[in-house]
Image: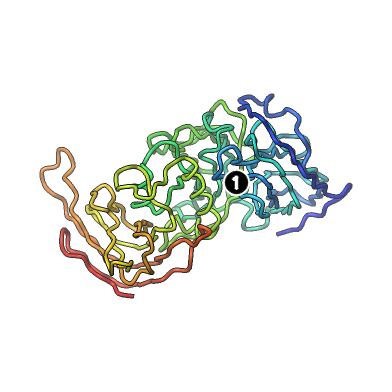
Amino acid sequence: MTGVAATGPPAVPLLAAVAFAHFWAPQTVADVDRPNLRVFEQSFDVAAPSEIVAVVHARCSSCWWGVAGREATALRLAVDGRYSQHLLLARGDTEADYPVTLGAVEPGQHRLVVDLDSTLSAPHSFGALVTSVDVRTIVRTENEFLAQSMAPILHARPNTVGRFTDLPILMWYEVQPTPRGRQFRYSVVFTNEDDGTATDRLMATWGRTTDIEFVYGVDVDDAGAVLREEIQGPGHQVPAFNGRHEGRHPLLWVATDNNMVSEAGTTAVRYAPAPEHFDLTKTSREAVMDAHPWSYALMEGEIRREGKIADEAPAGSGRIPDLRRFAFVEACTELENAALAFSVLARDANGARWYDSDRGLPEFRIVRTGCFRGAVPLSPGAGPAEAIRFRAFSRPPQPGVTERPRAAVRLTAVNKLFMLGDDYLPRPSAFNWIGALDLSIDGDWRELRF
C-alpha cells in the first residue's frame, strides 16, 4: 500500500467524555449533517487518483455492546466536509481497530474529520477516544484497487437506527472466475438478526448467532469493466442491481429484518466497513469471524442483552445456555437430499456421554452440502471433547414428488472443534481430520476418535 502523509495541522485526538440522557433516530440527510462534538481530525495528501481505507484506532471507556444503555458510542466521519458514514464504537475500553472505506479521492490534500454523534450514541456511553487513524491509499495499479473501488456502502435499516441491533461489523469479498472475466462477491457479518431463525436453531445449524449475508455481486471483464451487478433482495431473491453508485461503490439499503438489501431506501445513516479478501475454499464462511475473534465476544454480548441466554434452556425454546458451554464444529460433506447431525463425547462428574447436535429435533440438522459450522451445548463442568461422530438422516419428500430422490452423505473433513474461553474468544482447535467417510442414510453413527 502507498502511505499517506499527514500534512497541515497535526492529527487531533479529543476525549469525548459526555453522558447522554436520550438519543434520536435521524432519517434525512439534513439530520445526519447536524454539527457534533469534534473527536479527531487529520489532513492527508494523495498523489494519484485512489481509493482510501482508514483504520480508526479507538475506544470508549463506558461502552459495551452487551450492556443496555451503554451499547455503543456513535462517530460521524466526514471527508472534505462531506458526510462519509457512521462508525459505532462497541468494543469497550480496550483500543480496537475499525477499518472503514472512505471512497475515491483525487490528487491533493484532503481532511478527515471525526465527530461524536450524541443523537445516535447510547444514553450512558461516554469517553470516546480516537487515538489515531491510519490512512491508506490504494492506487489503480494495485491488485486491491478494483475490489476496494466496488465495495458496497450499506444504509441502515430504519428500525435499527439508534437501537443497537443488526450492526454490520465485518465485510469480505471473494473472487470467482467467469467465462468473461471475474465475479466479486461481497458479504457482511451482522450482529444477531431481528427476524429469522431462532437462536437455538442458529447455533445448531450455523454455529453462531450473528447473521452472515451475501449482499452484492458484480461481474467484470478482464479490463475491469462492469458487465453485470446483483444483490440479495427480500426473500433471498437475487435480482439485478440497477441502483445508484458513489464513484463505483453501489449504494445499498438494508431492507428486511433478516438483512436482505434493496437498491433504494429512506435512511441516510450508513456504514462502510472496509472489505477483506477471503478464499473460503474448503472452509466455512464463519472463518471470517475466526479471523476476528472479538466478533464472538460481541455476538455473546448482544444475545445476552436481548435475553436469549438461559442456563437450562431446552431445545426448541429459542434460547441457549452460556456460549462457553458450546462445542463448535466445522466439517465438510458431499451431501445430497439428506440431513446430518454430529455428536461430541465429553466427560462430566457423572461420566462420559455423547452430546448430539440436533438435540432430538430434525430441524436442528445440517441440510446443506460443503463446509458447515454447527455447535452443541455440553453440560456444566464438562471436560474437553474426546471423540466426534456423525449420522445421516433421510429428509421428508417434497410436496408433489412421488419418487424419493437419491440421498447420500460423504464426510470429507473435520476442520475444527473448539470452545470459547472465559473471555468468549475461541480457544485453539482440539481436532481435525481429512478423509472420505460414507454415512448410511438413517444408519448408525460413525465415530472418529481423537
- Left or right of 441? Residue 88 is right
Where's residue 321, x and y in %? 39, 51
Q: What residue sits 68% from the left and 54% below the top?
A: 95
Q: What residue sits 32% from the left and 42% below the top?
A: 317
Q: Secondary structure at mark 1?
A: loop
Q: Nearer the viewer, residue 291 or 181?
A: 291
Residue type, label 1: Trp
Quadrant position of residue 87:
top right
Q: Residue placed farthest to the right in the image?
A: 8
Q: What residue sits 59% from the left and 41% below the top?
A: 71
Identify whether 78 is placed above or below 393: above
Where's residue 184, x and y in %? 51, 50
Where's residue 239, x and y in %? 43, 36
Q: Nearer the viewer, residue 312 or 142?
A: 312
Identify whether 186 is placed above or below 24: below
Q: Residue placed farthest to the left in the image?
A: 402
| Quarter of the C terminus within the rendering | bottom left
Marker count (numbered): 1
> Can the viewer see residue 148?
yes
> Can the viewer see residue 218?
no
| Quarter of the N terminus within the rendering | bottom right
Label 1, on which residue?
64
Q: Nearer the viewer, residue 38 or 406?
A: 38
Q: Residue placed farthest to the front in the image?
A: 349
Colouring of the image: rainbow
Quadrant position of residue 431:
bottom left
Q: What residue sits 46% from the left and 43% below the top?
A: 192
Q: Nearer the viewer, residue 165 or 272?
A: 165
- Left or right of 92? Residue 440 is left
Where's residue 300, x and y in %? 49, 50
Q: Residue placed farthest to the bottom in the image?
A: 450
